[in-house]
Image (spheres, rainbow, N blue to C red):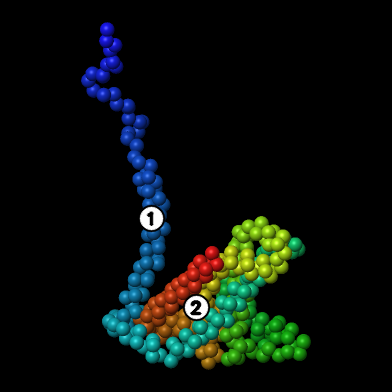
Amino acid sequence: MRTSSAIAPVGKRYRAPAPLGGRRRPVGARRGRVATAFLLPAAVILLAFVGWPIVSVIGLSFTDASGLGQSSWVGLANYREIFGDDDIRISVVNTVGYTVMFTPVVVLLALGLALLMNSPRLPLRSALRTALFIPVVVSLGVVAIAWSYLLDPNIGLLDHWFNRVGLDLGNVLENPTWAMPAVAAVAVWKNVGFYMVIFLAGLQGIPRHLYEAARVDGAARWQSFRHITLPLLSNTTAFVLIIAGIAALQAFDQIYVMTAGGPYRKTTTIVMQIYESGFTDLRLGFASALSLLLLAATLILSGLQLVFFTRREKELG
C-alpha cells in the first residue's frame, strides 16, 4: 500500500498580513530622507550666504563696479592691473613677510607649550592651560587696542618697563622696521593658545606604551621626541601649519587697528589692500579680482603643504 505524500495546498497561497501602518519602506531610503531633511536648512544657508556671494564676486571681478550707479564689463582689465600695480606688489611682499614671521613662530611655540602642558608633573597645569587659552576667546580688535596702549611710548607699560632696565623701545608702531614684527607678535600672543590645544589633542592620542618601550630600550627624551612624537604628530602639524598659514594670509584686524597699514605702507597686507580698494576707493570690481587671487593663492599654498606632509607620512610609514 502506497504512503501518501504531503498534500499540496489547493487554491490561493497563504500571504502574511501587512504590518500595521501599511507597507514598510526600506530603512536606507527612510534614513536618506531624514538626513536630507536635517541637511537642507544648513545647505540653504550656505548657498545663500557663501555660495551666492562667491558667484557675485566672480561676476564683479570682470566689471568696473563701484557700488554707485551702473557697472560696465571690463573683462580681464582688473586682473591685468593687479599684476602691474606697485601698491599690490608692496602688499604681497608685506603679506609674505608677515606669514614668514607669524606661521613658524606660532607653530613652534604652540608645540613647545603643548609638550609642557602635557607633562603630568607640571604644577597648576589646568590653570596654566586656561590662562594660555583666554586670549583666544577675546576679540582680536580688543586685543589690538590693548596692545596699542601697551606699546604707546608715552603711556605704555612696556616702554616704561624697558626704560627701567636701560632699554628704549620708542614708538614701535611708527617704526618702519619694527611695525610689522610688532603686529605679528600680537597675533602670535593671541592665537598660540588655540594651536596649543590642537597639539595637545594630538599628543594625548599617542599611545603611552610607545614611550615606555623606548624608555626600556634606553632612548633619551630627544630620541623619543624625534622618533615617536614628531612622526605621530605629522597630521596634526600639517593641519596647524595650513590653518596658521591661511590665518596669516588673511591678516587684517590688528593691522587695521594698530597701524592702519602704516608707516609708509610697511604693514599694508593684501586684505588691507582689498579693504582700501573696495571701501575707500570704491573699486569693488578691482577688490573682487584681488580677493579671488588671494583665494587661489590660499588654496595653492594649502594644497602644497598637504601634498608635502602626505608624502612625508608615506615615507615614514
Residue at image position (59%, 62%) is: 202
Residue at image position (66%, 71%) is: 112
Q: Is residue 113 visible?
A: no
Quadrant (top left/top right/bottom left/bottom right) for the C terminus: bottom right
In the rendered image of this protein, does residue 107 appear above or below residue 215?
A: below
Q: Position of residue 2 (x, y in %)?
A: 27, 10
Q: Position of residue 315 (x, y in %)?
A: 52, 68
Query: Helix or strand or loop: what does disc 2 sit on?
Result: helix
In front here: 305 or 21?
305
User: In the figure, is residue 47 to the left or right of 175?
Assistant: left
Q: How dense is the environment of label 2, judged by Cα within 10 Å: few (below 14), some, or many (20 and up)?
A: many
Residue underneath mark 1: 40
Residue type indicated by callout 2: Leu
Residue type indicated by callout 1: Leu
Residue at image position (27%, 7%) is: 1
Q: How dense is the environment of label 1, judged by Cα within 10 Å: few (below 14), some, or many (20 and up)?
A: few
In the rendered image of this protein, does residue 224 appear above or below residue 28?
A: below
Residue underneath mark 2: 249
Q: Is residue 57 visible?
A: yes
Q: Dividing the picture into quarters, in which one does residue 21 lie?
A: top left
Which mark lies nearer to you, 2 or 1?
Answer: 2
In the rendered image of this protein, does residue 74 appear above or below residue 106?
A: below
Are dots 2 and 1 in contact, CB under 8 Å?
Answer: no
Compare marks 2 and 1 and give the one earlier in the sequence: 1
In front here: 175 or 89?
89
Query: Helix or strand or loop: what does disc 1 sit on?
Result: helix
In front here: 104 or 194?
104
Q: Position of residue 262 (x, y in %)?
A: 54, 88
Q: Position of residue 74 (x, y in %)?
A: 29, 84
In front here: 239 or 235?
235
